[in-house]
Image (cartoon, rainbow, N blue to C red):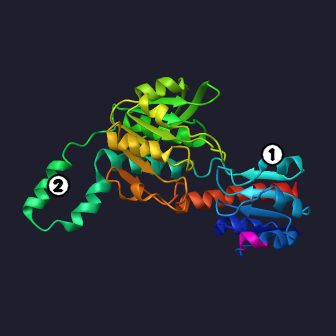
């Protein structure tokens, strides 16, 4: 019987799939500094973002056959090294797409209607004058319809963001490193007759995305030590008043340059779910009135976690039963 350590947990639905297949699942959390010894008793390890699987851990556990990442990004795993050693490395690239895309739009709606700032200030309102001041301040919001959304990275999550943007009536500028036409399926649910159709979207050069977008959202892998995707050079090429969303990885946006751009008015607002020094967040970010913050919860919905658990469990079963 294969034995799996789900060190960062697994949804109940996924665990049930593994157990039904005769796979022993341990969900007890083992501290990182104790994994090297403990992992020798397992055939595979399942992680999220809290646990890292580096070369030293892989070398110390020759019994390992599989490493699973319950999520999209695998920057906490030395993937190439593990595969060179003959290990199977799997992740769940599709399961969290809807959840992340909805958080992107939560941040977008926050920004264009000042909800993040209103939520901070409204609890202190005690007089009509104070109410009227805030009403006037927040009465110049924007609609997303007709605006241009630049999507940096056009995989599963980027395409989910595009579908939502198209549904609202936004113009979409997708960018991917290997520029190509991308076909995405558009669903229209809740109508008298459900309908689907395929839409071919043409990816654009990065420079065009920077110059023409009203909003820019990032959905790309970001290896440790890589140069930021958005820093001063890129901010200088953007429209004045652009809004930035980062639900990808901390460091993909240079936080110092972002703060400078915010303070200068080049960037009007930023919605951040990930951070350079996560879990620590710079004080300037925490207190800035034009930033909305969430604690790395992009894929963390009940539905998303269940889909992740089912997808990763199915792949584990296929591997050990194949």
- Between 54 and 112, the residue placed more toward the observer is 54
Q: Please tell me in which quadrant of the rendered image residue 22 appears.
A: bottom right
Q: CA distance from mark 2 to mark 1?
A: 53 Å
Position of the N terminus by quadrant: bottom right
Q: Is residue 32 magenta?
A: yes
Q: Please tell me in which quadrant of the rendered image residue 31 appears.
A: bottom right
Image side of residue 19 versus residue 109, left or right: right
**Is residue 150 visible from the viewing direction of this image?**
no
Q: Which residue has dot 1 on it? A: 80
Image coords of residue 115 (percent x, y):
30, 54
Q: Residue at (73%, 74%) from the top-left corner?
A: 30
Q: Main secondary structure of the magenta part?
A: helix
Q: Residue at (67%, 67%) from the top-left corner?
A: 8
Query: Could you tell me which secondary element the residue under label 1 belongs to?
Result: helix
Q: Which residue has dot 2 on it? A: 134
Q: Which residues are magenta?
A: 30-34
Answer few, some or many: residues within 10 Å of disc 2's Cα (few below 14, many 20 plus, some between 14 and 19).
some
Q: Residue at (64%, 57%) from the top-left corner?
A: 308
**Does 205 sit above or below residue 57?**
above
Q: Residue at (59%, 61%) from the top-left corner?
A: 305
Image coords of residue 142 (percent x, y):
27, 40
Query: Could you tell me which secondary element the residue under label 2 belongs to?
Result: helix
Image coords of residue 154 (percent x, y):
57, 35
Q: Please tell me in which quadrant of the rendered image residue 23 appears.
A: bottom right
């Amino acid at each position: 019987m294969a034995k799996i350590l789900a060190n960062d947990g697994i949804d109940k639905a996924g665990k049930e799939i593994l157990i039904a297949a005769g796979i022993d699942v341990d969900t007890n959390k083992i501290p990182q500094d104790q994994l090297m010894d403990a992992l020798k008793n397992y055939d595979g390890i399942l992680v999220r973002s809290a646990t890292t699987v580096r070369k030293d851990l892989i070398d110390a556990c020759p019994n390992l056959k599989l490493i699973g990442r319950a999520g999209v990004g695998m920057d906490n795993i030395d993937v190439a090294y593990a595969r060179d050693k003959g290990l199977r490395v799997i992740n769940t690239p599709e399961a969290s797409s809807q959840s992340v895309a909805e958080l992107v739009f939560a941040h977008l709606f926050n920004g264009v209607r000042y909800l993040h700032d209103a939520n901070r200030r409204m609890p202190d309102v005690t007089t009509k004058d104070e109410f009227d001041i805030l009403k006037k301040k927040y009465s110049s919001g924007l609609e997303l319809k007709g605006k241009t959304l630049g999507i940096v990275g056009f995989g599963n999550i980027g395409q989910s963001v595009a579908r939502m943007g198209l549904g609202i009536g936004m113009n979409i500028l997708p960018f991917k490193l290997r520029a190509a036409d991308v076909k995405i399926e558009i669903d229209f649910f809740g109508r008298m007759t459900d309908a689907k159709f395929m839409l071919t979207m043409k990816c654009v050069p990065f420079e065009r995305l920077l110059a023409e977008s009203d909003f820019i959202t990032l959905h790309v892998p970001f290896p440790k030590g890589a140069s930021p995707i958005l820093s001063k050079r890129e901010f200088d090429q953007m429209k004045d008043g652009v809004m930035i969303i980062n639900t990808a990885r901390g460091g993909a946006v240079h936080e110092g340059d972002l703060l400078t751009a915010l303070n200068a008015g080049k960037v009007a607002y930023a919605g951040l779910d990930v951070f350079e020094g996560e879990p620590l967040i710079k004080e300037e970010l925490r207190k800035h009135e034009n930033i909305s913050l969430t604690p790395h919860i992009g894929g963390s919905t009940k539905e998303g976690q269940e889909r992740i658990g089912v997808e990763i469990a199915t792949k584990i079963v296929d591997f050990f039963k194949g």
